[in-house]
Image: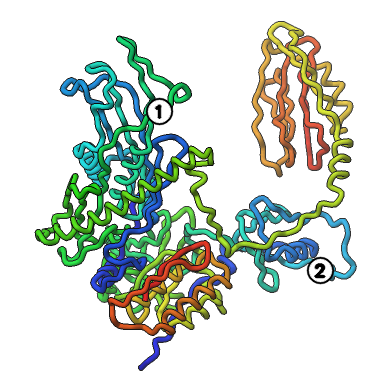
Amino acid sequence: MKQKKKKILQGGRGRCGCVSSCRETRCSVRMFSVLKERVGQILLPGDEFCCGPQDTLPLTDSGKPERLVAGPGLRLSGDRLLVSRSGVLRHKEPNKFWIESQQRRYVPAKGETVIGVVTAKAGDVFKVDFGGSEPASLSYLAFDGATKRNRPNVQVGDLVFAQFIVANKDMEPELVCIDGSGRANGMGVFGAGGLLIKVSLGLVRRLLVPNSELRADLQQLFPCELVVGMNGRVWVRAGTVQQTLILANLLQSCDTMTAPQRQQLFRNVWTRLHGAGLTEDPKDQLVLCGGPEPMDFLVFV
Amino acid sequence: MKETPLSNCERDFLLKAIEEKKRLDGRQTYDYRKIKITFGTDYGCCFVDLGQTRVMAQASCELVAPKDSRPNEGIMSFNLELSPMASPAFEQGRQSELSVKLNRQLERCLRNSKCIDTESLCVVSGEKVWKIRVDVHTLNNDGNLMDAASVAAISALCHFRRPDVGIQGEEVTVYGPEERDPIPLSIYHMPISVSFAFFQQGTYLLVDPCEREERVMDGLLMIAMNKHREICSIQSSGGIMLLKEQVMRCSKIASVKVSEITELINKALLNDKTARKAGGRCGFAESMPQERITALKTDQTSVEMTDVAETASSVFQTAEAPPQTAPSPLVPAPGVGQVGEGVRNTWGLEEEGEEEENEEGVSSGGDSVEEMTKMEEEQHKESKSRKADVVEILDSDEEEEEEEEEVVILYPETTGKAKNAGSSSGQKGAATSRKQRKK
């Protein structure tokens, strides 16, 4: 039997935020080291890091100023670095810093891939709702192999996986289902089956990171298919309806859990599934309530 | 604002899952979500949580003239509001179809069933009766607003206390809560509504549909009953055709559910009563659980506390004394008022300029006070000159300043002093003040 491997469609940037919000600055060595000390700590909006005239230059550091890339949540103003979101400060070598925060509202950014619902057909474009302030437009021709005569088979109410080519605050956002070279690259209309759930943006980023612990834990459970949109929407499909529902509930619950809590939850589920044995009899139903604090969730076997 | 559209994929999945008797959150077909009832600090305020659906009801009363057709009965009025807080699909102010439907159902369920003894609400027959008003606000919509609203309304009525009234001959005295304890309403029975959602033309049914299930359902059957198995109201919407057996089965399920919910309400009322008697803290704030997001939690960090006392006292000592408060205003010249004297500026700039200031002459007849606009921190301030006879001095705002700068008082002709209430902190960055003198 062919193992259905997990297919995760990745797009956009994993963790370090989008191009539009990165800025570089020349900064003194001191600010860099101060920032580095605070990595992993919680910062609040209003905290600032000054890069003013140096009082003392430590002899041990090399005198060369390093470029600092400020990601989402950090903002440059003159020679000060201001924090504009509350969250944990993260660092990626060599010089990227950003604030990781919990947020559910999505703001579109160019290059990010999202899951949208087609709401209307208007002339030559589809109107797609992705959870933002206004619906985005998706042209008929922006699909792989689509021509004026050969229209894509998309109905109102279908799910599409697309990326933004225009996304700023002044214009209507635009989506396309092809990449720069004209190929689909995993984007397009969804097939039948599966369930769409809404999660926070933090969870989405944790799922998309290259060596994600969350994905590794999910892999242990059972084979499934996941499509992760950066607008907080995740589409899941597993072998049976039961497994799909379990997966959906798991993802929504582990949003606010730390890693050890999550692993304990997954272990519980695994023992229920494999230890007790998956029975086909629908009357044999077990309802397991409650996981580790603070969220309760239900699993049924 | 429109609601997020339901995709075909979700609809198909939900219907398929229902055919296999699976629900999204793992409930059985006849299971209710977790119901939580809490009361506020005021009498008559009740919050009900049905899973994620949250509703608040408040009961209140006032003395009014009775209806002409029923001179010795009190009046009950119900109002259900769909607040935009509950869902992006609800608009403020607009009476949507759903809102009209829910209001009507609530009224039929509670008023037509005569659950409250309205004759006991009469104070003076034909003149004064109590009007009891129940307002239900929806705070979050996750499906099945009707059931939550009915539980909230009847709990609020059971919890409510109206002021005591004394009648002596012709005189009617309404006692406040400090004088005499308020008395509860007399309630005969508690009607509670139970909703059933039907799918696939009546083949499958679910009790207490959540929001997504409500969006794919074909029709809804609402049965309002009390624990004595009396049906108070029954309503079917959606245009589905139901068989007699189905309706009978639903009513049996409803009676079981209603007795459970009635017990829950009574228990909540009892808890609240004992908490109030014991003088313990009661109310909504106490009932909220502490919910934490642990994924972004860090351990406690230590704060450096050495020398805090010394640092604080040294700061106090080195800081200057605050300026004295202004004396009462004086009138140096007609049409001009002066309150206090401006503090000498400490910029250390343009000492000579200050002497010039004292000799200014202005030929305009009046004075004008201008308002200052706050400027960007990075820009330098420049003084503008308007008409020839007006002198302005603008102070610059510095970055860390808190005070608003005060403005200029101009004097006609004779010696006057233009005053600045300047800030006294040391400034970096340019602070320019240029004055023009007009001869």
Q: Does the rendering let one see residue B121?
A: yes
Whether callout 2 and callout 1 share a subunit is answered: no
Q: Between residue A99 and residue B250, name the one nearer to us.
A: B250
Going 62% across and 54% down the picture, which residue do you hit? A84
Q: Quadrant of residue B220?
A: bottom left
Q: Quadrant of residue A286?
A: bottom left
Compared to residue B424, the image places residue A27 above or below, namely below
Compared to residue B313, the image places residue A298 above or below, namely below
**Residue at the spot of label 1:** B182
Going 28% across and 77% down the picture, which residue do you hit? A282
Residue B226 location in percent, x, y?
A: 24, 47
Q: Between residue B300 and residue B12, name the one nearer to us.
A: B300
Q: Secondary structure at mark 1?
A: loop
Q: Residues within 10 Å of mark 1 (few under 14, many from 20)?
A: some
Residue A227 location in percent, x, y?
A: 42, 74
Residue B81 location in percent, x, y?
A: 33, 40
Q: Between residue B344 and residue B251, name the one nearer to us.
A: B251
Q: Are marks 2 and 1 in contact (CB under 8 Å)?
A: no
- What amino acid is labelled 2 in the image? Lys
Chain designation of label 2: A
Q: Quadrant of residue B332?
A: top right
Q: Residues within 10 Å of mark 2 (few under 14, many from 20)?
A: few
Q: Secondary structure at mark 2?
A: loop
**How far apart are the two marked residues, 2 and 1, measured between alpha carbons?**
78 Å
Q: Between residue B189 and residue B395, name the one nearer to us.
A: B189
**Residue at the spot of label 2:** A64
Compared to residue A24, the image places residue A212 above or below, namely below
Outermost residue, bottom side: A1
Chain designation of label 1: B
Q: Left of B2 or right of it: where is B400?
A: right
Q: Quadrant of the C terminus of chain B?
A: top right
Going 81% across and 12% down the picture, which residue do you hit? B415
